[in-house]
Amino acid sequence: MKASEIRSKWIEFFKTKNHKIEPSASLVPHNDPSLLWINAGMAPLKPYFDGRVKPENPRIANSQKCIRTNDIENVGKTRRHHTFFEMLGNFSIGDYFKEEAVTWAWEFLTDKKWIGFDPERLSVTVYPEDEEAFKLWNEKIGLPAERIIKLEENFWDIGEGPCGPCTEIFYDRGEAYGNDPEDPELYPGGENERYLEVWNLVFSQFNHNKDGSYTPLPNKNIDTGAGLERFASILQNVDSNFDTDLFQPTIQRTAEMAGVKYNDSVETDVALKVIADHVRTVAFAVGDGVLPSNEGRGYVIRRLLRRAVRYGKVLGLDRPFMYELTQQVADVMGVYYPEVVEKREFIAKVIKTEEERFHETLSDGLAILAEISGQAKANGQNMISGSDAFKLYDTYGFPFDLTEDYAAEHGLTVDREGFDKAMEEQRNRARSARQDNASMKIQGGAISELTVKSEFVGYNDLVTEAKVVAIIRDEQMVDSVSEGDTCQIVLDRTPFYAESGGQVSDEGILRGESVFAKVKGLFKAPLGQHVHMATIDSGELRVGDSIKAEVDKTSREAIVKNHTATHLLHKALKEVLGDHVNQAGSLVEPGRLRFDFSHFGGITPEELAVIERKVNEQIWRQIPVVIEYKSIDEAKAMGAMALFGEKYGDIVRVVQVGDYSLELCGGCHVNNTSEIGLFKLVSESGIGSGVRRIEALTGRGAYEYMESQLDLLKQAAASLKSNLNDVPKRIDAMHAQVKELTRENESLQGKLSSIEAGQLTDKVVQHGDTKVLTARVEAAGMDTLRTLADELKVKLPDTVIVLGAAAEEKVNFVVIVPQDQVKKGLHAGKIVKEVAAVCGGGGGGRPDMAQAGGKDAAKLDEALRLAEQIIAG
């Protein structure tokens, strides 16, 4: 059975059980800073599990693409370790529970219409205290007790939030994978290859509270996960996941390119498997907008790419090749994940660019490694330090074994312990840099109990009469609040927009006969009601009161200008930079707009100017903004863009700006682009992981910004004693003048150095057969000091020269040792290191020339005396 058939059967089976099939979410978590990647089928569904959002259908199933890189070193060396994998899942949010989950799992696995496993080959594990699960397997399903193993670790708990016992289902692969009756690990759940876990059913029935206690959940949930790759390996009767149809096309194509055969040698097979795994991960990540970089997700992708390229070298592939394998990934995975087909050319371009860059980097790294090795030998050392090896690994992608191989060729070893220490320090930094957020929230509370209706009317009305239907204060439902109270209010209808899709919440007031309250923001309750965060300024407010809700009109008008401008900007970016550009986040508030988007490489000033003009042209065209509700299929057929990380229902809101922009959006917009007035880019920058950010202003904000820039230009003109039009010419003239003065200054400095060098020759002293010059000189910086040292080297070729200079409370040293003195054991790098230490500094260099800096100028003379003592022996 092909992997695609297994996936289809999973989806079809749970459709028969009235589950909503949730499409796979992006690998990039949406509004979840606790995760670097989506790493499990339930990860994108966490708001359902902890009660923040109520799903339309409490029964959900999916096939979710996932990335995990915690065991990267095992990929290719074991049967089942991957960085990218698919997790099949079925979920119940407060609907069915253990009996249905167990019964349906057994039906899907054993019924020949679906998977058709031999029931005699299946065993399960349960949590020892979960008698209900044991009885279901034993009495309802009919599994004998000896094939139901009780394990203490069968309890799913990730800290604060929902948790509960689990039951895992194992498939017996037969005696060929283990038959030693003395093996203590040969049982379902043990460390062995015979009993393969295929499905884990988690019975989420407790809250893990902040104080460490456990209480029953208000709504019990089911969370399951099954590995598609594992199913495929069993049903295709192959030795490992890599032998399935998910990987073999990529492995065979790589082997063909390299002129090798799969299953010929362990080393070759590991390389082929690593490449097949990593190219799949990288292709999907790039397809979801993650680009190689030096931080975060982009760094993970860069590491995987470079690791695969290194394994390509093992196969003799010394050219960019991975980008060609994106075709195999698209052929295998495109049936269910169209993005790897639709974006294949872009994915291939990104991978090829990164491969080419890495091949250049490898050359740079080899040059640096040669320098490090030479320095070690010159210093009389036979080992490359762990910190140097780690720098090569972290900066240039050099695997430790490559550094070891090179070192061995040059008669050196590498400090493995130091390398491992540096690696662990980096991991600790990465862990501490991650936001320490609980990955789930405690289920329950007053907000989760809200069942009242609340209608949003703010697309068309900014003022409306409304009735108070719920009040929450201090996380409790209350009947009334009074002056000074801060509370949360739900109205039966509201004009206030609740923060969503990058657009900030409205602000405004609630007023009644005996109350005046300020609304400072909103959020959505689990059933979508708009909850107003308010402060009672005067009077008293009761549930059932009629009030007038008024949005701050000035603020909303500024917000809608910025929001519609982001749609125009999105389209302009695609036109100028390419269709690969996708929104990766936005912020729309009264004072500005911020737009994050995927793009590799920088953006030129000329491109930014074109982007800005394109947006303004749409404003000048005075285009009506048309908003309609369509079915999701109809909207996609129209070509409407769906935005990063957003979930859409069957009916969607389509925002169309003439023939220019068409997007799915639930936000507020202008009626005509002319209302935006003016669009002005303020800044553009990279923010990591192949994501760039533009900040811009519209309307009054854009005008005021341009006026402030014009004022600065006028001030500059006044300082230059020029009119506005001649400012650039005046600045160019001043640059030329400064350049000429700099040349004259350098010439004078050279002449002064020559004069000073002539004067210093009289200060040479003799220590045995060694001539020494140590001197404190005047030099504005290291460049001037080196120039003086070079002058002296010409005049005194057989003299050891040590110069020190103090400038701006800093100290600089230069040491020059003639070659005949180097042969006798003097080393400029070692001398300068000791001398600089006296002044609280450090440095080093070659045996014949070295430089260093220090902090304490008061000890300069002491340092020079030490230099003469060291040289004199």
Image (cartoon, grey):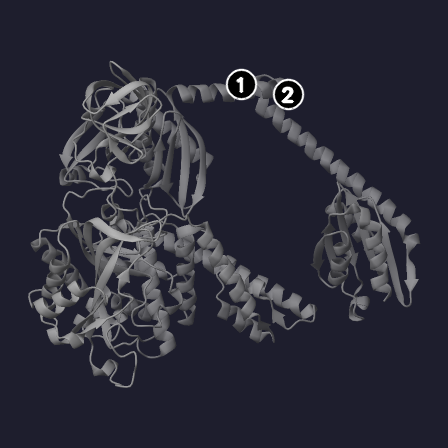
- Tell me, for residue 711, which label it has, or none: 1
- Tell me, for residue 329, which label it has, or none: none
Who is closer to the viewer here, 836 or 171? 171
Q: CA distance from mark 1 to mark 2?
A: 14 Å
Amino acid tagged 1: Asp
What residue is at 30 percent from the left and 46 percent from the top? 441
Residue 292 visible from this viewpoint: no
Instruction: Give the secondary structure at mark 1.
Output: helix
Who is closer to the viewer here, 642 or 169? 169
- Residue 56: x percent and y percent? 15, 42
- Residue 547: x percent and y percent? 22, 18
Position of residue 768 in the picture relative to residue 205 (left or right): right
- Residue 82: x percent and y percent? 32, 64
At label 2, counting other C-alpha atoms closer than 10 Å, the crowd grade (few under 14, some 14-19, many 20 or more) is some
Who is closer to the viewer here, 60 or 514? 514
Amino acid tagged 2: Leu
Between disc 1 and disc 2, the foreground one is 1
Position of residue 23 in the picture relative to residue 763 (left or right): left
Q: Quadrant of residue 716?
A: top right
What residue is at 75 percent from the left and 42 percent from the top? 809
Who is closer to the viewer here, 165 or 354? 165
| Marks 1 and 2, the one that precedes in the sequence | 1
- Is residue 624 depicted above or below 49 in this figure? above
Q: Quadrant of residue 534?
A: top left
Position of residue 599 in the picture relative to residue 98 (left or right): right
- Residue 138: x percent and y percent? 12, 70
* Residue identified by numbered label 2: 720
In the picture, which quadrant includes the C terminus? bottom right
At label 1, counting other C-alpha atoms closer than 10 Å, the crowd grade (few under 14, some 14-19, many 20 or more) is few
Residue 578 visible from this viewpoint: yes
